[in-house]
Image (cartoon, rainbow, N blue to C red):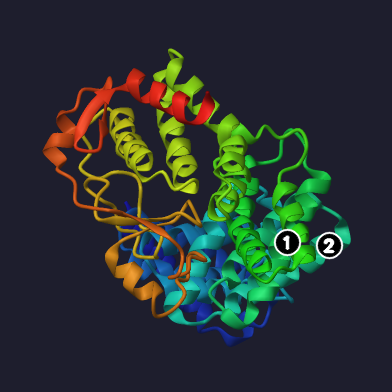
């Protein structure tokens, strides 16, 4: 069926393309775009993506007002790892001064969709070294939204644009300004429907920067800069947001600051409420939230320099993920943040940054970090890291679910919770 339809469509397209007079009519060109799109769909249906992808691009050039095709084309480009076509798509989408791309992005307001879209365009730009595409993607739509006052979409676009510039050392201040503008718009206009994952992303980006500024100001005895950045870090989460629901609550970096200046009493006070949430999550009857609890615990203990509890949380965080899958997955869900996206068979032979808290690196990406900044994060080689040595996978997998690894031995989950209470809560 497809082969016959393909032959007919190809014959019609060839005949129309060769008719120079017919092609002078804009409506005819749009019709040709529709035919190319239909033909591309036929090739995709039978798995011939190499043939389909150039046809998708042609259809968008010929019919740029078909907004849904921007997203559909993008899906096929990603499916076949066509970075060059992603770049081409963005340039094609800037037809008519970006009007059609603006309409497409404003129509698609889902944060997760836009985040994946922006991340993959950024990756494509890095691999093809055509960084201008990020400017062409975001600047027209941001200018448009600033005029219309749709701050909900504006803060998302500013966040994503900042992410796309983070690898450009000479644009660091512009990057930070975009993130701070995004946060300002989020804080001013957030409501119950606002995405916590957007706020998490902003905190994850800005909090390590503020922490570093605070540390530098402390070393320089610059009380004003220290107070300004402490205020920024403390006020990074809006009123009404329950910080315990955040993946990256700002208390993590405040805890880290107090620990680094030697005030562990203040550090424990700052992280106490977060540790209490971990205990509550691990004590209720809902096992589905245990993974979230171990995830939070890993970051909390890393912030205060507690390596042993960090490793316990890490081991059981990944163990909980495997249980959620309903199978003994060979690969854990935690990946390297250096850009290689390496998954570990067990949570071993990695480095966890105590400053960035969300960053994990393998040895190769750590070596790269010492030479250049990594494109996917802001980690620095002078940060302090937890070195996770190679773990025995069979031993780790043999530990009963009600037990947790504790150094070279195992203890019950209740014993571990009691240890946390005694050290951090009592």
Closer to the eye: label 2 or 1: 1
Residue 110 visible in this rendered orientation of the protein: no
Q: Nearer the viewer, residue 41 or 347?
A: 347
Mark 1 closeness class: few <14, some 14–19, many ≥20 residues within 10 Å: many
Question: Residue 112 placed where, x, y %?
Answer: 57, 47
Q: State the mark number for residue 393.
A: none
- Where 24 sits versus 226, above or below? below
Residue at x 44% of width, y 48% of height = 305
Residue at x 19% of width, y 27% of height = 399
Q: State the mark number for residue 146.
A: 2
Residue to which mark 1 is pinned: 226
Question: Residue 346 placed where, x, y %?
Answer: 23, 45
Question: Residue 50 placed where, x, y %?
Answer: 33, 69
Residue at x 45% of width, y 36% of height = 297
Q: Residue furthest top?
A: 285
Q: Nearer the viewer, residue 211 or 262?
A: 262
The secondary structure type at the circle numbered 1 is helix
Question: Residue 275 placed where, x, y %?
Answer: 52, 31
Asked whether, in this view, residue 373 is left or right of residue 241, the answer is left
Asked whether, in this view, residue 103 is left or right of residue 72, the answer is right
The image quarter in which residue 55 lies: bottom left
> How many discs mark residues in the rendered view?
2
Q: Nearer the viewer, residue 159 or 224?
A: 224
Q: CA distance from mark 2 to mark 1?
A: 32 Å
The secondary structure type at the circle numbered 2 is helix
């Amino acid at each position: 069926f497809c082969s016959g339809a393909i032959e007919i469509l190809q014959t019609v397209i060839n005949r129309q393309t060769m008719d120079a007079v017919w092609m002078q009519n804009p409506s005819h060109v749009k019709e040709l775009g529709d035919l190319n799109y239909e033909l591309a769909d036929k090739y995709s249906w039978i798995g011939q993506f190499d043939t389909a992808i150039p046809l998708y691009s042609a259809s968008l050039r010929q019919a740029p007002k078909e907004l849904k095709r921007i997203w559909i084309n993008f899906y096929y480009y990603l499916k076949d790892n066509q970075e060059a076509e992603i770049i081409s798509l963005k340039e094609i989408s800037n037809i008519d001064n970006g009007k059609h791309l603006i309409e497409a992005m404003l129509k698609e307001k889902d944060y997760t969709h836009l985040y994946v879209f922006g991340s993959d365009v950024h990756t494509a730009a890095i691999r093809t070294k055509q960084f201008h595409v990020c400017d062409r993607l975001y600047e027209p739509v941001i200018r448009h939204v600033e005029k219309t006052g749709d701050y909900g979409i504006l803060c998302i676009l500013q966040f994503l644009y900042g992410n796309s510039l983070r690898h450009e050392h000479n644009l660091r201040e512009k990057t930070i300004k975009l993130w701070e503008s995004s946060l300002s718009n989020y804080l001013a206009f957030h409501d119950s429907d606002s995405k916590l994952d957007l706020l998490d992303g902003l905190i994850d980006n800005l909090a390590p920067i503020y922490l570093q500024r605070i540390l530098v100001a402390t070393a320089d005895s610059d009380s004003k800069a220290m107070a300004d950045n402490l205020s920024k870090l403390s006020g990074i989460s809006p009123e009404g947001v329950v910080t315990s629901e955040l993946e990256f609550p700002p208390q993590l970096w405040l805890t880290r600051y107090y620990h680094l200046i030697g005030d562990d009493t203040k550090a424990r006070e700052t992280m106490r409420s977060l540790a209490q949430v971990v205990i509550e999550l691990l004590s209720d009857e809902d096992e589905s939230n245990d993974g979230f609890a171990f995830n939070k615990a890993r970051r909390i203990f890393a912030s205060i320099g507690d390596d042993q509890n960090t490793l316990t949380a890490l081991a059981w965080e990944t163990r909980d993920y495997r249980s959620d899958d309903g199978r003994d997955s060979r690969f854990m869900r935690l990946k390297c943040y250096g850009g290689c996206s390496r998954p570990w068979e067990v949570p071993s032979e990695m480095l966890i940054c105590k400053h960035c808290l969300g960053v994990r690196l393998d040895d190769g990406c750590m070596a790269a970090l010492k030479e250049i900044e990594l494109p996917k994060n802001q980690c620095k080689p002078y940060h302090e890291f937890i070195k996770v040595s190679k773990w025995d996978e069979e031993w780790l997998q043999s530990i009963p679910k009600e037990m947790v690894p504790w150094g070279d031995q195992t203890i019950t989950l209740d014993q571990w919770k009691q240890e946390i209470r005694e050290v951090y809560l009592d």
